Image (cartoon, rainbow, N blue to C red):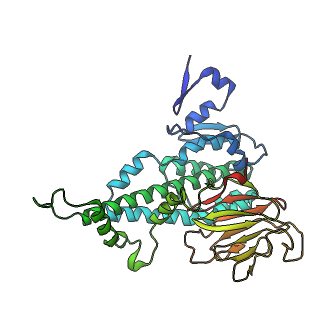
Amino acid sequence: MSSIALGTTTTTAADTERRPHAALLARFDLGTGKREMLRSLERVVGRVRARPLQLELANESVEVEDPEVFAFALQARTEPASEALVEMLAMSDQALQAQLQLHLQQESRLAPVLARCMLEPQLVSEHLLSLSLSTFDPANGWRELFEALLHLSPRENAYKRVALVKYAQFLRKRQQLLKTVFELRLRRDAWERARPPATADSIGTDSGDDRRAATDRSPSRASILGLGGATGRRLPLRGAQRNRADAHGPNAGLRSLSRGEPVVLRIGRGRCASLSLGGNRFRLLAGERFYLIDPLGAVNALGANEAIRGAAGGAPPSETGAGANAAGTSARPLVSLVGRHVSCDVVVRAELRAISRRHLLIEPLDDTSARLTDLSTHGTAVPTEMMFT
């Protein structure tokens, strides 16, 4: 009986007859063996069934039966190859800085297009044409895939949107990989500076406390890499440090959202949901009108593009549901884009640098729940108990 290798599992010919997309999954899989449950895929592609997709990849004709299968098949490509970490560790400081700059350029070009595609799914083809192929990294076959997708008919918008979301997830994971490499180098260099010259008298006498104290006093490698110091640019490592601290810190109990995949929160009328945007705590108040409250207590009415400053204590208009509609209307707000960019519906303070220029979409569904879509590089976390799947 013939079989098709699929990551860590084996798919038989009989399975292929029952699941006609099995061969397709093998075609797209990169051997990571990692899978996500199919139940999350509907949040990417919606409920509307699209027609099968015909693609030409590497001089082969590939047929995809629907966007859900396409998303499932592309999941393996969101993981950077293990060889990428080895290559980064072997790079010089200058080469690593160039790699970071390339990543930031790709991210800055993609982010506004991702936001527009999520807000206007019917115009995905038009928005994608504003990107050049150089925006897409050749790693994991992404550039080849988008070269085949970009000029397809708008009837294939559902597939294009899936590919864009999965590529955005790949960029976030690659950024985490870069952060890991920076952290390893900073720790290694700090340890080497803290270590005294080896002598017959000093061998075995330096303590861990001495090394840690010297590490705290040592200058940062960031100035060498052009990521801090006199340049004033924040070190990408900080996001990784914050994420680890959140596992046992103030963000405990929150779950990070997958980039580009909508999630519904059931908050309850007059109740607040605690959100973490790039490690910064916000509150989302549900009711006739929804309000987003920033860490300093500034209250933003969603759907109105207006900020209502609370009292000294930062209290929102109401946290009991009474009088929550400051604008005097019960009309359902539209989707609100939250971020640091001036074009956002809710513009957060510029000093909150870990929040992306276009960070989060919030779409109230009724007076108790809202749909959230994370668009950011540093992530959004929400209360686990409020997530509805």
Does the rendering let one see residue 126? Answer: no
Task: Report the residue at 56% width, 61% height from top.
Answer: 132
Residue 381 position within the rendered picture, expressed as x and y whole percent measured from the top left: 63, 58
Query: Is residue 280 positioned above or below 387 on the image?
Result: below
In the displayed structure image, the side of residue 3 where residue 295 appears, left or right: right
Q: Using the image as rendered, state which of residue 162 and residue 296 is in the foreground.
A: 296
Task: Report the residue at 37% width, 61% height from top.
Answer: 96
In the displayed structure image, the side of residue 206 where residue 96 appears, left or right: right
Q: Using the image as rendered, state which of residue 27 and residue 306 is in the foreground.
A: 306
Does the rendering let one see residue 79? Answer: yes
User: How many numbered badges does the structure rendering display?
Assistant: 0
In the displayed structure image, the side of residue 230 where residue 379 appears, left or right: right
Residue 349 position within the rendered picture, expressed as x and y whole percent measured from the top left: 62, 77
Q: Using the image as rendered, state which of residue 94 and residue 129 is in the foreground.
A: 94
Q: In which quarter of the image is the N terminus?
A: top right
Residue 350 position within the rendered picture, expressed as x and y whole percent measured from the top left: 59, 78
Task: Report the residue at 48% width, 57% height from top.
Answer: 176
In the displayed structure image, the side of residue 146 where residue 124 appears, left or right: right
Task: Report the residue at 50% width, 66% height from top.
Answer: 105
Q: Where, by quadrant of the figure, is residue 294 drawn?
A: bottom right
